[in-house]
Image (cartoon, rainbow, N blue to C red):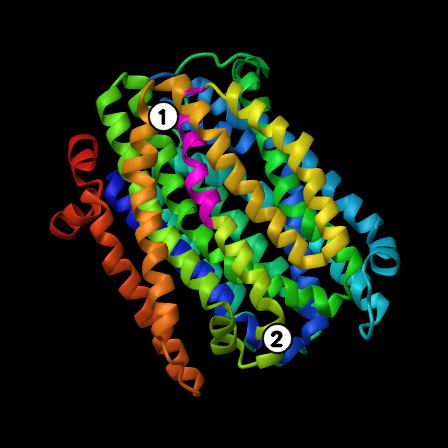
Amino acid sequence: MSLKKNIIANYASQLYVTLIGIIMVPTYIKYMGAEAYGLVGFFAMMQAWFQLLDMGLTPTMARETARFNGGATDALSLRRLLRLLEAFFIAVALAGAGAVSLGADSIAAHWLKVEALPLREVELSIVLMGLIIALRWMGGLYRGAIAGFERLVWLSAFNGVIATARFVLVIPYLIYAGASPSSFFRYQLAVAVIELSVLVLQCYRLLPAKPLGPHGPWQWTPLRKVLGFSLSIAFTSAVWVLVTQIDKLVLSKLLSLSEYGFFTLAVLVASGVGVISGPISNALLPRLTRLSAQGDETAFLDLYRGATQFITFIAVPAALVLACFAEQVLWAWTGNAQLASQAAPVLALYALGNSALAIAAFPYYLQYARGDLKLHLIGNVLFVTFLVPVLVWATLRYGSLGAGYAWLGTNVLYLLAFVPIVHRRFFAGLHAQWLWRDVLPIVLLSAFTVLALKALVVWPQERAWVAFTLAVLGMCVLLVTCAASPRIRSALAANWPLRRATQEHG
């Protein structure tokens, strides 16, 4: 499967899924109310924490599938590994859903600050959340296998269909069945059942045929072979959840449910910057893993550096526009001037932090492809030891604004202090070229352009014209930023910044 097609499909899917989720939020608030939407934000946070139970097995499944494609493992080992992981996922999903159900009354009465919603309604919603989260989490295993087979065009199309069902078709259902939180989550449960069923069928359709001859009894050997890598990923994932969700967990306790809904709005808009890194990582990880297994260092570095420039070119201008024009973005989106004024500072800080995160993630892709996450583990230990306490302290002391500053500082510090160590470990001399040629020129020119436009622009009064002005400003920043990257300039003629790597290895 062509890398170019995979990346394009991932971007189209992720952009659609994220944008449709963001666009529909004001409609949810209109029908459900801000307090009920706070429950939706709480559900998203719970879903992220549930990933702690993954133990690194989903990305391990994706990596082993990619290794099978590269000829590094056999069909029987792959099928045995999937069989083992299925048993683990089913057991954990049942336990997790049961634990959430048993704790629903305590969460509703003692953790969340419920104001107007009936407690029984909130308890029922939390029980439904547990079931939905368990089903979606199980789907991650099969998504990993499908991604490892590089069937990302199919996966992207399927994600778009499911997103439409989740975010758009739920509105007619709410109008018909009633706009209560429990109605919303009942509908999402039905979608989750359909989603998991289709993923299972597609995964088994892609699996290699069973080898002839005796297959032997149930064995733990396939899991033991990848256990070290899985545990490394598990620790990384745990730290990731801790760093990215601890503020949301603390604020879900400190803020009223309606205030928490408004905080969720700001973070959701800022998460649009994360769309930049997600699709390309899904396509890059199996391809980098394959190039590493084949020993093609030239193509490996060419793809790595080209992808870095591409991500920086998209993520940084998007984050700067969101940060410098946060209030205008929120007002054009929601039409609520008070909400826009209150949420704008949080949006600005989280957007900038997300752009730093998108760039700082690249050394992780390098280590993942090499199968060596020792340095990544060390970096994450530093996160836990020094940065998470700062995040908790800032959130407790300054609320959502403190969380935003801690998020931004955490990611910038990691990018500047730890990424150079990772680069020196794997490729001597890489970091200086990566930073000074692939990252900084784009960052500096983007910042200069956005600040210049901020000083010059005169904002119209109508929401539609504000939205149009924002779109024009964003395009202007992208066009000017092209001058900072030779690869991006070449892309205008070649149609894709990674064309050469794709042609040689697609």
Q: Position of residue 307 (x, y in %)?
A: 30, 39
Q: Is residue 145 above or below residue 293?
A: below
* Left or right of residue 348, residue 294 in this image: left
Query: In this view, which residue lies farthest toward the bottom?
Result: 461
Q: Is residue 356 magenta?
A: yes
Q: Position of residue 18 (x, y in %)?
A: 46, 59
Q: Position of residue 113 (x, y in %)?
A: 82, 64
Q: Nearer the viewer, mark 2 or mark 1?
A: 2
Question: Going 69% across and 34% down the picture, which residue do you hit?
Answer: 91
Part of the protein shown in magenta: 355-371
Question: Going 63% across and 26% down the picture, which residue do you hit?
Answer: 381
**Structural distance between the alpha carbons of marks 2 and 1:** 45 Å
- Of residue 159 and residue 208, the one placed in the foreground of this image is 159
| Quadrant including the N terminus | top left
Q: Quadrant of residue 446?
A: bottom left
Using the rendered image of the protein, determine whether residue 149 is visible from the camera's viewpoint.
no
- Of residue 86 and residue 360, the one placed in the foreground of this image is 360
Q: Position of residue 234 (x, y in %)?
A: 60, 29
Q: Is residue 158 above or below residue 89?
A: below
Question: Going 38% across and 71% down the picture, which residue do you hit?
Answer: 455
Q: Which residue is mark 2?
A: 339
Q: For the residue labelled by badge 2, is the local secondary structure a helix, a strand or a loop?
A: helix
What secondary structure do most residues of the magenta stretch adopt?
helix
Q: For the residue marked with disc 2, what is the amino acid?
A: Leu
Q: Badge 2 local density, few (<14 within 10 Å), some, or many (20+)?
A: some
Q: Which residue is mark 1?
A: 289
